[in-house]
Image (cartoon, rainbow, N blue to C red):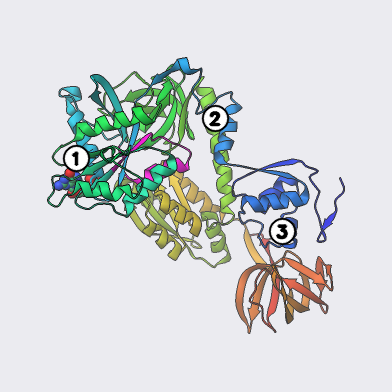
Amino acid sequence: MQAPAIGGVQVRRGNGETVRLPQGASLFDFAEKIGANPASLVQIMLHLGEMVTATQSVNVETLQLLGAELDYNVQVVSPEDEDRELLESFDIEYGEDEGDEADLVSRPPVVTVMGHVDHGKTKLLDAIRNSNVASGEAGGITQHIGAYQVSTVVDSEDRKITFIDTPGHEAFTAMRARGADTTDLVVLVVAADDGVKPQTTEAIDHATAAGVPIVVAVNKIDKEGADPQKVRAQLTEYGLIAEEYGGTTQFVDVSAKQNIGLDTLLEAIVLTADAQLDLRANAAMDAQGVAIEAHLDRGRGSVATVLVQRGTLRVGDSIVCGQAYGRVRAMLDDNGESVPEAGPSRPVQVLGLTAVPSAGDNFLVVEDDRVARQIADRRQARIRNAEQLKKRVRRTLEDLIKDMEKGTVEDLVLIIKGDVSGSVEALEDALVKIDVGDEVGLRVIRRGVGAITQDDVNLAIASDAVILGFNVRPELKTAQMAEREGVDIRYYSIIYQAIEEIEAALKGMLKPEFEEVQLGTAEVREVFKVPRIGNIAGALVRSGTITRNSKARLIRDGVVISDNLSVSSLRRFKDDATEVREGFECGIGVGYNDIKLNDVIETFEMREKPRD
Ligand code: GDP
């Protein structure tokens, strides 16, 4: 195939060939797929009027623009699509009920409770559950497993309802963000003495966005100053019009504290589900569903609560759940009772998985353990790749160790968070005992029990620390913040794995050592403004050679103004040049706008130097 030059850059054209890239891919990934030099793609983007670096993740439009320019058909695949394709390669369809209408049976609604803080979500979930524990049942020992099921009688029929008992919006949106729409119906709790508040409307937005009907529980009617009618009036503004006012939304006055109105609320849920939803599933197929909570138990290993969405899950089934797999060794319900099988909408704790899945991971029963392991392995590999991709732009453990090599960082600084204080202490003890010689140090600046918080991430940003999470995870917002700020959070569930990894990283750093080699310097004689590209330096090469794509820094009056630059464009008169030697004039672009007369552009490269 002809390779026409685009702005002086030679790249093989695609001739309509399809290139599949994951969401958030960089030019580097694109280049890898088509066997091109990433720097060439950076230049082509420059000619197209967009300044992007090779490793920065770019949006879909940019990838497609570049694809069109090079005659490639770019397809951006979401993680969900990738997973669907993975399962299809095993002849598995996830998310569909097998068979036709005749195979579907009705299933209970799955309910999430949302509303403003302190309006009584937790209290209501507890009250509903406690009032529903049949006397004598399992000695009344209820367990918090992330969801529970209750029964109620409507029109003399026994009906069940499943409640997800992690109230709040984060769990709901986190699941949805991962493509797991578990909730059929939202109970919106509004305190009658407080009325509509910011999180009330936020909850309405979430439910509306998910297309999920709302039943309003007007709570705390026992309190002085409670005004349930005012809540109804306020909510009409948000499109929730009570039935008694001619609307379709059920409002139920309750008191979670005094157990008032709970049965009416359950009835309203069932009636709303019947009127607005067609909740049916095939109960006869291999089970599929979603993990809603999971943790590592000392005695029992991985314990995961899954919500069966279709099919029936049985003890002995081979399942895969996110990156975990295994055979269902035992199943427990929310009373801690062992159950042999679980049908649609039933939440159960599953024992027997090899690892701890994350909330929102899908689970499915497969033919045998071998298939389960293969799927889990492939998912692990994919997630590793995705992480690798991110690592190029993040301050990872590896980056920090590289900086230690260069001498710009002296210690490896860690923040350790864990589920119990024993494991945090054990981990810290073992880590500080790692013997890596005098050259490097390891410092733990915070240790604690509980989830990784925004404050931990802030501390990590401020002190260039890596966060180790032992059986703990950050909240979605915290994870997003860490992602944005380039903070490396590493998760472990086995102590020796954490130790091994840190030790290997630290020891690894003792191998290669890099030294900087100066390539050339150029003095800025003029500054040109180039539309859409930015400032270009008209410069005279003072020493060595200036080479395109080499690393560069900008120096003003002996002070480094910017260090992390590269020569992104280099021109002699009107032509692109790959290098310009001492004594010649040229135009240099370093992707940095603050260039001034008499600044010096210095180019250099890092060379590995053998250890002695
Ligand atoms: P959440 O933040 O929405 O989960 O709210 P909580 O369930 O933690 O309840 C917040 C506070 O309101 C607690 O002190 C509860 O005891 C109290 N509360 C909840 N429901 C009622 C109720 O029906 N009546 C009264 N008087 N207090 C309630």
Q: CA distance from mark 3 to mark 2?
A: 37 Å
Ligand 1 within 8 Å of the CB at mark 1: yes
Check disc 3 and give the amino acid type.
Answer: Met
- Can you identify the residue that label 2 sits on? 375
Is 224 situated left or right of 407 in this image?
left
Label 2, residues with CA under 10 Å away: few <14, some 14-19, many ≥20 = many
User: Residue shown at 59%/31% (left/top)?
Assistant: 86
Which callout, 2 or 1, points at the residue further toward the start of the chain?
Answer: 1
Residue under numbered circle 3: 45
Q: Position of residue 117 (x, y in %)?
A: 27, 51
Q: Is residue 348 in view from this perspective?
A: no
Task: Say what amino acid the circle numbered 2 marks.
Answer: Ile
Q: Is residue 557 magenta?
A: no
Q: Which residue is mark 1?
A: 254
Find residue 165 and report its image quarter: top left
In magenta, the rendered stretch is 165-188
Which amino acid type corresponds to the residue marked 1 in the rendered image?
A: Val
Give the quadrant of the N terminus: top right
The residue most toward the right is 2
